[in-house]
Amino acid sequence: MSVQQPKFELRDEDELSLDLIEAQYALKDSQDKKNAKSVLILVSGIELAGKGEAVKQLREWLDPRYLRVKADAPRLLTTYQTFWQSYTRFIPAEGQIVVMFGNWYSDLLSTAMHVSKPLDETLFDAYIDQMRSFEHDLQHNNVHVVKVWFDLSWKSLQKRLDQIDASEQHWHKLHGLDWRNKKQYDTLQELSQRFTDDWFVIDGEDEALRDQCFAQYILQTLQELPDHQTKVTEKWQQAQIPTALLEPSKQSLDKDDYKEELNKLTKKVADALRYDERKVIVAFEGMDAAGKGGAIKRIVKKLDPREYEIHSIAAPERYELRRPYLWRFWNKLNDGGKITIFDRTWYGRVLVERIEGFASVVEWQRAYNEINRFEENLVDSQTVIVKIWLAISKDEQEVRFKDREQTPHKRFKITEEDWRNRDKWDDYLKAAADMFERTNTDYAPWYVIATDDKNTARIEVLKAILKQLKAD
Amino acid sequence: MSVQQPKFELRDEDELSLDLIEAQYALKDSQDKKNAKSVLILVSGIELAGKGEAVKQLREWLDPRYLRVKADAPRLLTTYQTFWQSYTRFIPAEGQIVVMFGNWYSDLLSTAMHVSKPLDETLFDAYIDQMRSFEHDLQHNNVHVVKVWFDLSWKSLQKRLDQIDASEQHWHKLHGLDWRNKKQYDTLQELSQRFTDDWFVIDGEDEALRDQCFAQYILQTLQELPDHQTKVTEKWQQAQIPTALLEPSKQSLDKDDYKEELNKLTKKVADALRYDERKVIVAFEGMDAAGKGGAIKRIVKKLDPREYEIHSIAAPERYELRRPYLWRFWNKLNDGGKITIFDRTWYGRVLVERIEGFASVVEWQRAYNEINRFEENLVDSQTVIVKIWLAISKDEQEVRFKDREQTPHKRFKITEEDWRNRDKWDDYLKAAADMFERTNTDYAPWYVIATDDKNTARIEVLKAILKQLKAD
């Protein structure tokens, strides 16, 4: 996918500014409306090619109150952190524009150029693929991504280096590369060839034109933002509902056996979670009253609260709705520690949001792959994901609902909404079936656990965690 | 201020749970209402005294979806970070309850116990004072702070250490202290005496009573949340409006002199900002059209956008309004880098919020000291704060407003609201006068700069920065 390189000519600055501001306000006004978008501008390129100046100039032409420029020095990519992790907090909300000066590409380039441990080509290209997929998913979630590369010839770069003063030169040097080194320059140019075909490339030679090219390209982008996709292209193939969901096993355990087994397993799980070198995410889904709370309680039984965090996921807040649906999970993981437990998860997108129509058909159908990529990125970054579906029978749910209604201190656990969800039982089964079929990956498989017998379920949950950690 | 230590007896668990949930829902329902509150529970104490168990139990008795437990291993306090910096992101919003297991006190204790570099008593007590002030300010901003200390005798601690298995023992050891060391235990007990008189202290001896004491104390807290303070205690002393505000100087500069001076100063400022070892915050306030944007442009002229971040502060969003007014600034500083520029600031509390009535009289009158403490904490943590008020005359503002109205690409800069604010000119002058009198501190003084002549103003802004950095 290569970007068409538009040609721009110098325009009257005041008129350009006026057009930019109008486009910016139109974007801003889209917030909370049907075609709401945000714009994320990634800026990278050769040092001294003028990207800094161009961004400063754009800031002056726009209303700076609604433009955020996020600029960080490059971070080296590591195997224990996803490339997007440091940046997701700054993904713009609907109506906003964010310029990311430091971004995953500058991190990748720095890593690849890092002399003591250079990145090999296969890994480099694999990163590029992942980054493009991530941006693709952002686009689909209404974050329009624009990538602009500022280029500069070796000769001009050297001339500019001659002209800047010592302090600036020192600062630029600190930022990773020796721009006096021809071999490094050539390597960087070679590397950039490997991914800039979907970037808008600006030649930094002509300073006035450079700033205008950048601004005019952003203007064009703002004016031509695509509508949200609404058409579904393929006919949906409903997956068959697994027997494990239709008729969950009711096999029960002897009480003494349960106690002994539980005691043994809670210790084993605590050790496995504690001493695994990777981060661990345990993700629970299932019908209401399937026993998620009770299962979580047993997982953390022998752990200290400083060792884990539990997130109970409720409906998203308005400011969260203005970002990609994964945004609130990205951020929870960023703030998190070694062990994170989710009582309901990002799978809400293909369960409740699908069924209630909060996500459009195109959106939830697209979400399976988005979620798979999200999880794959995490697993590739030293994280184990244990996904557990607690399967309850419809009869047993009714028993538990009624028990909740009749027990004062449990009454908060049951609302009209739970009964309404129960009416949609078959829809949920279908949605779950589709979910299993499409997100039961090698790197993050689903564990479907029958919960009509609570004790058996709790034991099985602990075993699933051990299995996924390869500690059983 | 010592906390009265209530006595609790064992209650029926289901009834206790029911009461807790009711109190929790009442808190939750207060969101966006007049008496909205949030509750922040700080938990610390002797290892194995059962704080982890008590928190886990509380989580089971409450609705876990609306209780967040944030637990971190202790961090050592440093001289280049405020003690609250790692925690402000997790300050609860109205209606929420957050338990902070790791908190500023555990950090302080760890730091004080750190063998190679123990903290001296004066510094320890100074930290305690600061922490209490910070909590006091949180309380006033509707975050009710509860502190619970779990105590355990040396004998019982040793007995419990004998009973836990190797893995747990190892984990507890990793958390800072050797709990087998009597001397360390005694030191910790001594240290804790220095600050726990305003804590609710729970004896960890009796396990069942311990969990109930904790839960019942939280219940009592939830049931007895104080109303928001509305009465103003003292008569307000309006400060005299400084001449510099009433009649800003119109002194102008020769154009050539300006260019030369500007060129020299922008370089000097870039170097000073770049090479100062501290972080730098430049904070702008002033009437509309006073030239904040133009001044900022000159500050960053010789800097690369990766070296600084600019925040243009607009009205707070709803989710921000549910937290203390400083919350959004805390977080911006947490995410920030070395140089941060604010186009409008936290002083909005005592300017626009005072004048428009968004803050109550008690609230804005209290804000001066809150802001002073906020800035003092930052300055104590290797941060320079340069506060600049751009003073424009009322006539010159009119000229600039009209120019904005008549220039298409500047029209976005002028709205009906600006004209309405202009009608309140005298109120703003009074508010500014009070602000100077009460927040012009040694560690963060105000620079009032006349801006009727834009060029002079820009030069003076650069000089002010150099002066505050002691680089002039």
Image: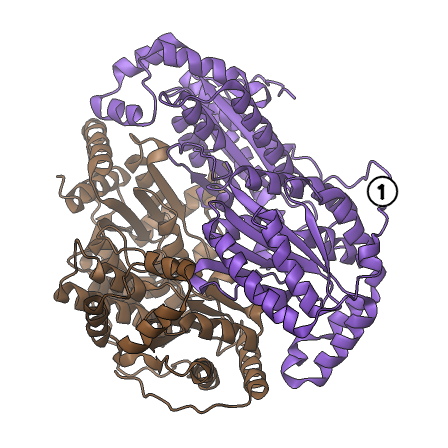
Chain colours: A purple, B brown
Above or below: residue B305 compared with residue B248 = above
Q: Percent x, y for residue A246?
A: 84, 59
Who's the residue at 38% across and 55% down the image?
A: B329
Above or below: residue B393 compared with residue A164 = below
Above or below: residue B64 compared with residue A374 = below
Estimate how packed mark 1 is, as few (under 14), some (14 to 19) or many (20 or more) residues with alpha carbons within 10 Å.
few
Identity, as a three-letter code, of the amino acid under mark 1? Trp
Which residue is disc 1 drawn over? A236
Q: Chain of mark 1?
A: A
Tell me the quadrant of the picture where the C terminus of chain B can be found: top left
Looking at the image, which is closer to me, B263 or A459?
A: A459
Tell me the quadrant of the picture where the N terminus of chain B can be found: bottom left
Who's the residue at 80% across and 74% down the image?
A: A398
Q: Secondary structure at mark 1?
A: loop
Who's the residue at 21% across and 66% down the image?
A: B184
Q: Is residue A186 left or right of residue B445?
A: right
Q: How many marks?
A: 1
Q: Percent x, y for residue B75?
A: 31, 56
Q: Percent x, y for residue A221?
A: 60, 31
Q: Does residue B317 appear in this view? A: no
* Quarter of the view holding residue B172: bottom left
Q: Percent x, y for residue B233?
A: 29, 83
Looking at the image, which is closer to me, A26 or B398?
A: A26
Above or below: residue A334 compared with residue B317 = above
Q: Does residue B334 appear in this view? A: yes
